[in-house]
Amino acid sequence: MGTWKKKNSYTNKVSYISVPAQIIKSVSSSSLRDNKSSKRNTTKFLFLLLRNPKLWAFCFLSLSVLGIVSRLGPCLSPSGPHQESQLRSSDSIAYTRSNSTHAEIPNADDPSLDMIPKPPVAVVEKNETFGGDSKLITASRHAFWKQPDGLGYKPCLDFSAAYRRESKRVVRERRKYLMVVVSGGMNQQKNQIVDAVVIARILGAVLVVPVLQVNLIWGDESEFSDIFDLERFKSVLADDVKVVSLLPANKIMTRPTEDGGMPFNASPQWIRSHYLKRFNRDGVLLLRRLDSRLSKDLPSDLQKLRCKAAFEALKFSPSVMELGKKLAERMRSKGPYIALHLRLEKDVWVRTGCLTGLSSKYDEIARLEGIKRPELLTAKSSMTPNERKLAGLCPLNAKEVTRLLRALGAPRDARIYWAGGEPLGGKEALRPLTSEFPHLYNKYDIALPLELKPFAKRASIMAAIDYIVCKESDVFMASHGGNMGRAIQGHRAYEGHKKLITPNKRQMLPYFLNTSMTETEFEKMMKKLHRQSLGQPEIRVSKAGRDVTKYPVPECMCNNQSTPTI
């Protein structure tokens, strides 16, 4: 540690007074011409000073004040340490704007520049991990990144006393075994696994680890333990439903009773009345096609079990979680990031019957595919593409996503992670996004080549990686609903209501088509329409279509003002 020497602490201090160059020139020339006369004037001044005591006192006082000011100068300087720290912590946007004003630039060789106080430079870090330009780290203070008020809501899974008493009997069950086969993409499989847990509880049965049906489209042969953490799944649900990996030896030869199909919105009463009698007789029940079959309106304890299965028990396997978290850390290594779930694939345009927003060439490709495969069309066939769009039934294309993000204040230097399949039109489909937001990446951009290689033919695991990076983002937006968008919305709410933009498509699209609006008016309108669609707590009302895993308040979350629903 250095030693502070008081004696010479101010001997090296130098003060500068800024004076126009013309005055300096005139003073210098006059001083050279009148050097001799200045000496005579100095002698005369000293003689007067000695004869006049008042003048002597005034000069002594002036010199004292100047000495004090010179000592306090560094503390009073506007560019002192405190002020500098304030400037360094200011928003990078303000700094950028202040530097963009046009001014005359002085000659860089001018030595007087060394005497001009320089503005503090915002700290710049370059993205050494993957692509991208230098970025001001102070951008994280931009208003766009502000998180919604979660109103104090936290996970609250307090089961009723009756549920807990019943649990003791259910977990001792050894006679009835429920087997389920889940299908579809990873997010569909997750929904069905959660429902299988609840159905096993309703029937008081042991749940055999769900079988993942081989996906014929992607050829994914992943098993449950490849995607999900099996041991965690069993242990977290140990007090609610017993989960086993295989049927016991005495049941292997039993031909399971296979149900022909469960209706949509099946209630617990319907499930018990249709399955319990056969279940008690045969001991093994096999269920398929569970997607969206179980009612969304269930008793409070079963809703809590749904949340417990979805958010606490059903975690991804350690290897998948590790890679997903690693990619999320890379995205956040230089500041906050946005995650987008873009639905721009060919099959999405075919199923929705919507126009791509690219060109007639790609619209024709989607139309011909729809004629070839009419079973894919899930939209109302009586509506025209434009009617579907104005009804909010179409995915937002990249141009619309870009304009919405810009209107809501997303900074141009924002880092954006996009999840989804290969867009129809490839890079051309993403060009509006990349031109406005150049830091656009997906998992292939930020992962090392060997990191994704083991999962090259595992579409469900690739979807799980996207899920993790999107869930961990600072801001999330899905261009078109879907299972992944709904699941991430609920998960982000359960983990503290992190910011999520829900495009109000039905109300906002007419303004997208209004060419008479100025961009300022458009931005104001977009902010107004989405003021209540930024991830704030939403109370789940009793509607069949509102899943508690998307709206976990109030059954699965409570605050100081609310009481647990028991």
Image (tube, helix red, strand yellow):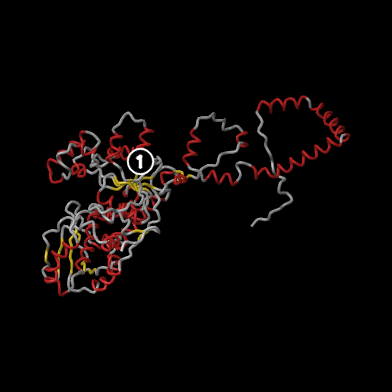
Residue 321 vertical placement versus 422 (above, below): below
Q: Residue 243 vs residue 17: left or right? A: left
Q: Is residue 379 visible?
A: yes
**Residue 98: percent from the left, percent from the top?**
50, 36
The residue that appears at 21% across and 69% down in the rendered structure is 206
Q: Quadrant of the N terminus?
A: bottom right
**Mark 1 crowdedness (10 Å alpha carbons): few <14, some 14-19, many ≥20:** many
Q: Residue 289 vs residue 120: left or right? A: left
Q: Which residue is mark 1?
A: 405
Q: Quadrant of the C terminus?
A: bottom left
Residue 488 vertical placement versus 26 (above, below): below
Residue situated in front as seen by the camera: 443 or 98: 98
Q: Is residue 239 visible?
A: no
How many marks the image carries: the answer is: 1
- For the residue marked with disc 1, what is the amino acid? Leu
In the picture, residue 507 is in which quadrant? top left
